[in-house]
């Protein structure tokens, strides 16, 4: 895989590997050669502060692997700031902030197609972004600068997301439009490579605005203002409203619901007050939302796509926290202390203007 933005390249690592083979094959060579993997972690940390990215040759597997300070010990999302620029050509400006002190990386990627300028991020999953501008939409991988265009949509949609890695044959994009002013809503699906979106289908809706969408086990789940939950089965193209309406306290209606999925469980998170949050877990037997006061050794990361991260062992410090963006910095709310705190793992003060989302780290 080619990494556009790191200063080191796989070519450099290959030279190291070839040199290793050459020296180790020389007769009478008394030099002792050791694998990069034998370096102490502290040594990697010192080097890592000076380099954007470190690549090592693993002697056993002969694969180029990524190594960095605490990189493998913190399986949590990175913070991405994204904005567009134009200097005769459209370019994507990305700032990646890693959850380790003073580690950030900036990329400038030229994008072919002026129509993509000012597109907004709708979803972030598997290291890919789904962006939309008017009726145009496309996938963008900021690590590899790869773009996958999608057909134009029939109408503007409120929310959209996707099921799996866009390069996989089972990836499905989903878009929905619903508002409080109409008892009808519109759904449409598409797969990368299709010439057009599926025929936009009109269904009876809850007469509420759709606030978030997640995918789980072949179904897209949609939460509406007031907590109403609906489900769209991809295989059967069947829509059903799973609950009634107005299931949560009315005081939360002015706050957008963030829905989180993990192992088939669903949560919705609302901001209540200035820096407080309320969390509800879906009870499948009662088909209702139950207020909860603990995440169960998890951490939530809220943005256009929200993530659930296991917070045990090496990540236990994240447990019972909700990470979110506030003004020009990122914060977390502790369900234990009932207070918000500015992040220590994401300590950067960011500019106003660029979109900020959580993005999953690249797989090496």
Image (cartoon, rainbow, N blue to C red):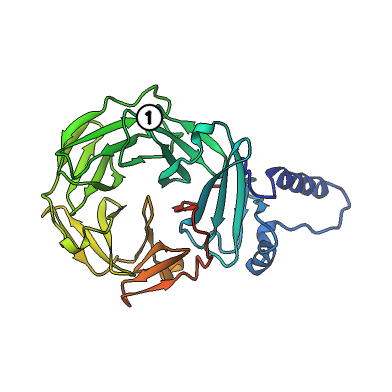
Q: Percent position (x, y) of residue 13?
A: 71, 47
**Up-down relation of residue 5 to residue 283 (above or below):** above
Q: Percent position (x, y) of residue 112?
A: 57, 32
Q: Please name the residue shown 46% across and 40% down the image.
A: 119
Numbered label tally? 1
Choose top left, top right, bottom left or bottom right for residue 163. top left
Q: Please name the residue shown 40% across and 27% down the image.
A: 151
181 displayed left or right of 218: left
Looking at this view, name the residue that lies furthest to the bottom: 337
Q: Please name the residue shown 38% across and 61% down the image.
A: 310
7 displayed left or right of 188: right
Choose top left, top right, bottom left or bottom right for residue 203. top left
20 displayed left or right of 219: right
The residue indicated by pointer 1 is 191
Choose top left, top right, bottom left or bottom right for residue 278. bottom left
Q: Does the rendering let one see residue 37?
A: yes
Q: Does the rendering let one see residue 362?
A: no
Say which of 25 and 362 sits in front: 362
Q: Percent position (x, y) of residue 88?
A: 63, 35
Looking at this view, name the residue that lies furthest to the right: 28
Say which of 334 and 110 sits in front: 110
Q: Percent position (x, y) of residue 146?
A: 54, 36
């Amino acid at each position: 895989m080619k990494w556009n933005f790191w200063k080191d390249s796989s070519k450099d690592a290959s030279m190291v590997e070839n040199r290793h083979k050459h020296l180790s094959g020389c007769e009478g060579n008394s030099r002792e050669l050791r694998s990069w993997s034998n370096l102490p972690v502290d040594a990697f940390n010192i080097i890592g502060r000076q380099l954007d990215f470190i690549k090592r040759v693993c002697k056993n597997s002969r694969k180029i692997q990524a190594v960095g300070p605490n990189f493998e010990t913190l399986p949590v999302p990175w913070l991405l700031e994204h904005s567009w620029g134009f200097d005769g050509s459209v370019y994507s400006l990305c700032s990646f902030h890693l959850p380790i002190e003073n580690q950030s990386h900036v990329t400038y990627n030229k994008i072919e197609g002026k129509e993509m300028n000012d597109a907004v991020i709708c979803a972030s999953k598997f290291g890919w972004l789904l962006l939309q501008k008017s009726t145009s939409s496309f996938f963008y991988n900021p690590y590899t600068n790869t773009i996958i265009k999608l057909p134009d949509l029939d109408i503007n949609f409120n929310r959209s997301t996707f099921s799996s890695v866009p390069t996989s044959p089972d990836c499905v994009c989903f878009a929905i439009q619903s508002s409080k002013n109409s008892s009808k809503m519109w759904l449409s699906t598409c797969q990368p490579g299709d010439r057009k979106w599926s025929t936009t289908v009109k269904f009876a809706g809850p007469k509420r605005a759709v606030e978030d969408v997640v995918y789980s086990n072949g179904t897209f789940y949609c939460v509406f203002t007031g907590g109403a939950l609906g489900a769209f089965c991809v295989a059967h193209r069947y829509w059903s409203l799973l609950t009634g309406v107005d299931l949560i306290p009315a005081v939360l209606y002015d706050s957008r619901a963030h829905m989180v999925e993990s192992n088939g469980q669903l949560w919705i998170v609302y901001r209540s007050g200035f820096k407080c949050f309320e969390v509800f877990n879906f009870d499948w037997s009662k088909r209702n939302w139950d207020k909860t006061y603990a995440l169960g050794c998890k951490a939530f990361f809220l943005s256009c796509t929200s993530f659930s991260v296991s917070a045990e062992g090496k990540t236990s410090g994240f447990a019972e926290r909700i990470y979110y963006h506030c003004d020009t910095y990122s914060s977390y709310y502790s369900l234990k202390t009932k207070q918000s705190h500015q992040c220590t793992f994401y300590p950067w003060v960011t500019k106003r203007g660029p979109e900020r989302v959580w993005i999953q780290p690249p797989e090496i």
